[in-house]
Image (spheres, helix red, strand yellow):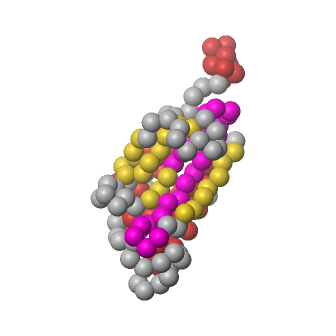
Amino acid sequence: MSLKSQQANMKAIYSLVSQNLSYIHGESETGPNGAKKQFHTKSAAFLRALGRDLGLKEFTVSKNYGGIAESGEITLMGLWSEGNGVYFQLSQSVAGRNDFLYRHIAHTEDYSGGSNQWLNCDLFKDGDNEAVLDTLLALRKSTDTEAVSRNAA
């Protein structure tokens, strides 16, 4: 996905989490609809492209629509190498916090991983894809092979 497309998705995601995604206008409580559906669709597309941009060797993007009182969450879990990965989750906070959760993980079923960290949602308002990449890439640990090649250079 192009940088311009990623930035457009980021701005759309910001706009969507800035509104009440838990209100579903009379639709089924558990089904995706309206703005909530758009949030999940845009977020999944953004996270799939982000996984590629981060250089993850393997990754999955999952969606949990949640119920009537929440936005649900869209999650990227991926690995650069064995024991070296990232967990990044987009959701609308019910506590009024405009941040997205991220942390280091050791494997693709690591749901407790490293310490929770928070990425300010305002980066999405400005479409600051580079800042998001830099923040998440900071979690990447150098492998022994990478360290040896840097020392040899």
Across and down, in percent, residue 145 comes to: 69, 21
- Depth check: give the residue in front, 83 or 28: 28
Residue 56 visible in the picture: no
Question: Farthest residue in the bottom direction?
Answer: 26
**What secondary structure do most residues of the magenta stretch adopt?**
strand
Q: The C terminus lies in which quarter of the figure?
A: top right
Taking the magenta stretch, the answer to whether it contains residue 3 is no
Out of 45 and 151, give the one closest to the viewer.
Answer: 45
Q: Residue at position x 42%, y 67% from top?
A: 70
Q: Residue at x 64, y 44 (%)?
A: 108
In the displayed structure image, the side of residue 149 where residue 128 appears, left or right: left
Q: Residue at x 69, y 45 (%)?
A: 58
| Residue 21 falls in image quadrant | bottom left
Which stretch appears magenta? Answer: 67-88
Residue 26 image-quadrant placement: bottom left
| Residue under the point 60% across and 47% down | 77
